[in-house]
Amino acid sequence: MARVSGVDLPNNKRIDIALTYVFGIGTATAKDILAKLGGAIKPDLRVKELTEHQVGLINSLLAKEYKVEGELRREVQQNIHRYVEIGCYKGVRHRRNLPVRGQRTRTNARIRRGRRKTVGSGKMTAAAAAAK
């Protein structure tokens, strides 16, 4: 099992697909990485067929030119913290645990807002019943 940037890549996958298991690398970036290695690693090669030298090449390229895993996660968290501190719209949405990128909240947004809380369908209070 090859270990790239602290992530164990699945053995039976092609290397261009397996690289997407690293946080911060998508399919386009994975293909770009393999192209930058100049044919040293073919995209149709399986992870279990990689040599230690090839894994080292990938690791050194990622360390030199890309932000991945912990470094990228840290940067994203710092950006969110900065939004919250300066009080901009995105920061307010983060603080209130609401969708940040313009999604509707009248319906949907259940993941951010939590379980449904039914409002107004409970029993009538004594004061409300007397007023009726």
Image (spheres, helix red, strand yellow):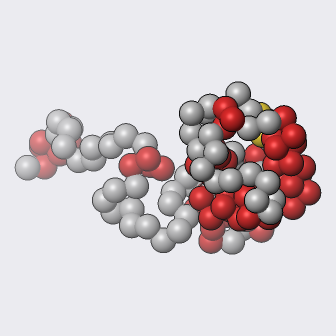
* Residue 62 x %, y %: 83, 53
The answer to whether one can see residue 81 in this image is no
In front here: 11 or 49? 49
Dividing the picture into quadrants, the one containing residue 104 is: bottom left
In front here: 74 or 28? 28
Please, is residue 110 above or below residue 39 in the view? above
Tell whether 10 sits left or right of 6. Answer: left
Please, is residue 24 above or below residue 92 in the view? above
Determine the residue positioned at 57% across, 39% down: 13
Residue sticking out furthest to the left: 132
Determine the residue positioned at 74% across, 33% down: 2
Dividing the picture into quadrants, the one containing residue 1 is: top right
In front here: 69 or 33? 33
Tell whether 72 sits left or right of 46. Answer: right
Tell whether 99 sits left or right of 81. Answer: left
In front here: 124 or 7? 7
Dividing the picture into quadrants, the one containing residue 18 is: top right
* Residue 63 x %, y %: 89, 51
Across the whole image, how many numbered discs are drawn on residues? 0
Please, is residue 124 above or below residue 93 in the view? above
Determine the residue positioned at 67% across, 32% down: 48
* Residue 15 x %, y %: 65, 46
Determine the residue positioned at 80% across, 63% down: 38
The answer to whether one can see residue 119 in this image is yes
* Residue 110 x %, y %: 39, 49
